[in-house]
């Protein structure tokens, strides 16, 4: 099923104008593995720019809003801002018609976490408080929009800290402390609790190709060294480091900087991570699908759009076996001829805290209570 995508821009975040002659899109969101820190989403857009020298699009500057929409499915792919602009002018130019047939425009765009990365903490004293209260305080201090789903069900106390780095540094530390996730493809950052329960109605299969199963043509199983550790060191600010080990030295150590509110809480976290990472495994890492190969296109419908697929529980059927996983990040590429969606996954065994009524994290024989 062929897909059509529109790129539109806005200087006021209200009125959007479509860009013509788009030749390629490359988008990356989220992260590849659980142990990775979150970076700003990145997007590169290649545009044929034949009349740009004579009549440039003046809005193509840093800070302009950019939105990608799949017009075939009416789903939002991603929403961010221009970070940089580059023009490549060809030699041949027709001065009579003001056309440069080989001129190209490249937009480098970024997700909202980039703004947090440019916002200095300026030694802000973040008080110890609940997760939701700290997120509100962060937004009030730095003036940046944030949403979250931390609630009375999961709203733990997080230790206070003084921000010596950027707000993105703090946000990554906050997220690591709570074992949460970050979304940012809707022109804002969203903090997700580890107990977020997003059950996807769209899954992946090597044979089934219908409204609930998207067929893939690439699958990666890897023995991830980055998901194998025999010693966990949790280094909370304000408390001594807490260590949990399995086996004997030499250890494979993972050191996590956190804002745990007590040494006991940090030790619980260390023991939890050790149970997750102490065993080697050959695990599912990613699946990749061509949009035009789908009988019923749902690759951008795992969430409300492509950008918020992060955190969704999915199943992947491979050679008759069903694997359970969580989407950690994704990439999207498109040209006038084809579009591809790739999803980076963490196995259910690395997300084994129990969530009732969840297809991936509610299996009583596999999941256990968290920490």
Image: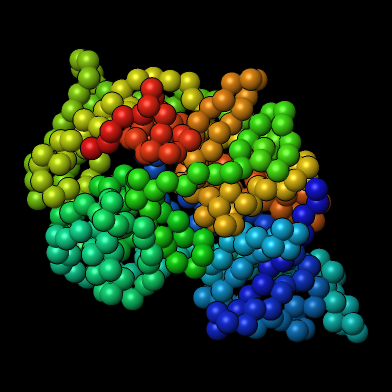
Residue furthest to the front in view is 357
Q: Dividing the picture into quarters, in which one does residue 183 lie?
A: bottom left
Residue furthest to the top in view is 248
Answer above or below: position of 211 versus 93. Answer: above
Residue drawn at x 31%, y 44% is 179
> Residue 208 in the image: x percent, y percent?
72, 31
Nearer to the camera, 74 or 77: 74
Residue drawn at x 69%, y 62% is 74
Colouring rule applied to residues: rainbow
Residue 246 located left or right of residue 325 = left
> Residue 97 in the image: x percent, y percent?
90, 82
> Residue 260 in the image: x percent, y percent?
17, 48
Q: Dividing the picture into quarters, in which one does residue 363 lie?
A: top left
Residue furthest to the right in view is 96
> Residue 148 in the image: x percent, y percent?
36, 60
Residue drawn at x 59%, y 54% is 306
In the rendered view of the protein, which quadrant contains the C terminus? top left
Residue drawn at x 31%, y 71% is 139
């Amino acid at each position: 099923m062929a897909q059509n995508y529109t790129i539109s821009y806005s200087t006021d975040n209200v009125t959007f104008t479509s860009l013509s002659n788009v030749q390629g899109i490359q988008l990356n969101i989220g992260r590849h593995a659980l142990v990775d820190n979150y970076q700003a989403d990145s997007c590169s857009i290649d545009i044929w720019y034949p009349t740009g020298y004579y009549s440039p699009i003046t809005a193509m500057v840093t800070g302009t809003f950019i939105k990608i929409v799949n017009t075939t499915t009416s789903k939002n792919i991603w929403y961010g801002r221009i970070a940089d602009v580059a023009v490549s002018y060809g030699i041949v130019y027709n001065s009579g018609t003001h056309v440069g047939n080989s001129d190209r425009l490249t937009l480098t765009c970024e997700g909202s976490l980039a703004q947090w990365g440019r916002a200095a903490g300026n030694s802000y004293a973040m008080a110890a408080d609940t997760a939701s209260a700290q997120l509100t305080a962060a937004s009030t201090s730095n003036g940046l929009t944030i949403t979250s789903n931390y609630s009375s069900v999961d709203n733990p106390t997080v230790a206070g800290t003084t921000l010596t780095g950027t707000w993105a540094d703090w946000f990554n530390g906050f997220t690591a402390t709570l074992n949460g996730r970050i979304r940012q493809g809707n022109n804002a950052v969203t903090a997700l609790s580890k107990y977020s329960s997003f059950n996807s109605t769209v899954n992946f299969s090597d044979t089934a190709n219908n409204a609930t199963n998207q067929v893939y043509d690439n699958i990666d199983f890897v023995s991830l060294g980055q998901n194998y550790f025999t010693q966990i060191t949790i280094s909370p600010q304000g408390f001594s480091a807490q260590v949990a080990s399995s086996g004997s030295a030499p250890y494979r150590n993972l050191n996590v900087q956190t804002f745990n509110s007590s040494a006991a809480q940090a030790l619980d976290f260390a023991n939890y991570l050790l149970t997750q990472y102490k065993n080697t495994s050959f695990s599912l890492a990613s699946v990749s699908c061509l949009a035009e190969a789908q009988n019923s296109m749902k690759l951008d419908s795992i969430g409300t759009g492509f950008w918020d697929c992060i955190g969704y529980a999915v199943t992947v059927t491979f050679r008759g076996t069903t694997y359970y996983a969580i989407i950690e990040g994704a990439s999207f590429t498109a040209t006038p001829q084809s579009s591809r969606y790739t999803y980076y996954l963490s196995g259910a065994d690395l997300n084994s805290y129990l969530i009732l009524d969840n297809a991936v994290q509610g299996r009583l024989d596999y999941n256990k209570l968290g920490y």
